[in-house]
Amino acid sequence: MSGAFDNCTSVTPQCPVEATTYGYTPNLAGNVILLAVFAACNIAQVFLGIWYRLWAFGIVVSIGCLCEWLGYIGRVMMHSNPWDDVGFKIQIVCLIIAPSFLAAGIYLTLKHIIMALGPEYSRLQPKYYTWIFISCDALSIVIQAVGGGIAASSDGSAADTGANIMVAGIAIQVATMAICVLLAIDFAWAVFRSTKSSGASSDGASFEKPHQSYSTTKGFYFYLICTSLAFLFIFIRCIYRLPEMAGGWGNKLMQNETEFLVLDGAMIALACILMSVAHPGMFFPDMRTKKRQT
């Protein structure tokens, strides 16, 4: 929003919607639906976090959902007025940082998944998954927030600098998630091989693990599938955001709302839904700060 259109505050013949950063009027139905989904997930995460006393997980995932629906409030504001500067700032900052909080929630459960399936198959001690990935995720959040703040409060070259900082933060997030995916695949393969060899050599003996009471249940595998898919959806969104932000303000990819709604909005909405339906409080009793008395 610079140059000849610096003083534009609403759509007029002199200030066409095509001259805005996004080049379109945000679709009301699509953005309202996503707003409602994230608000519902936010309520669910707060309730489940309190019910199961999963404070850390509940807080970070609730913040992620909160940022998402706040971001879509900004986009709904831009539907009414594509030149709405406040709406633009709200959505650019909130929607950039939100997925990092959701990823942090998944990182918090990794230690417990490793312990449930067998820490001896992991290349890292379980505690290091939390330390390493949460630290890298926190770094990416800070960098993206700083970049988003600069971009939202500046014009011209300063806004470009903010965008570049955001890209750096997203790149750190993508790299962190890629490493996590590789470690997860390596761990899963080791567990699979061990399970097969144990089954072949134990004459029918069961495959015992530290938390077999829930690590071998259908519910546990349902949780693993949902969490893996949620992580994949967040990863897809982050990969999409790299070229979208790196191309500069108003680039062709940034001005394609359909791709944004599918590769950002829908991906994160699916992740939030899965993380709410398959809440770790239902599957990892040891994660609770204090077990509920029944």
Image: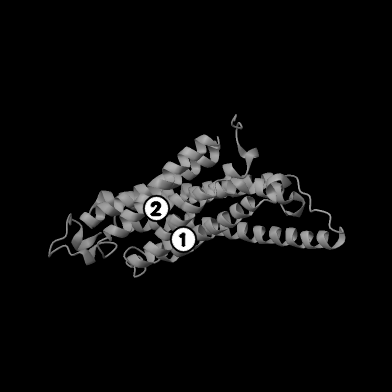
Q: Position of residue 117 (x, y in %)?
A: 71, 51
Q: Is residue 232 above or below residue 285?
A: below
- Image coordinates for residue 31, horizontal then vertical, percent: 32, 56
Q: Residue at x 59, y 31 (%)?
A: 292
- Give percent across and percent down for residue 8: 17, 57
**Residue 175 placement: quadrant:** bottom right
Q: What amino acid type is highlighted by mark number 1?
A: Arg
- Going by the image, does 198 lie left or right of 243? right
In this view of the protein, can residue 158 be seen by the observer? no
Q: Which residue is mark 1?
A: 237
The mark total stands at: 2
Question: Callout 1: few (<14), some (14-19), or many (20+) C-alpha neighbours within 10 Å?
Answer: many
Identified at 38% across, 63% down, the residue is 260
- Quarter holding the C terminus is top right
Disc 2 crowd, CA 10 A, few/some/many (<14, 14-19, 20+) = many
Q: Please report the residue visible at 75 percent of the width from the left and 45 percent of the height from the top.
A: 210
Q: Which residue is mark 2?
A: 95
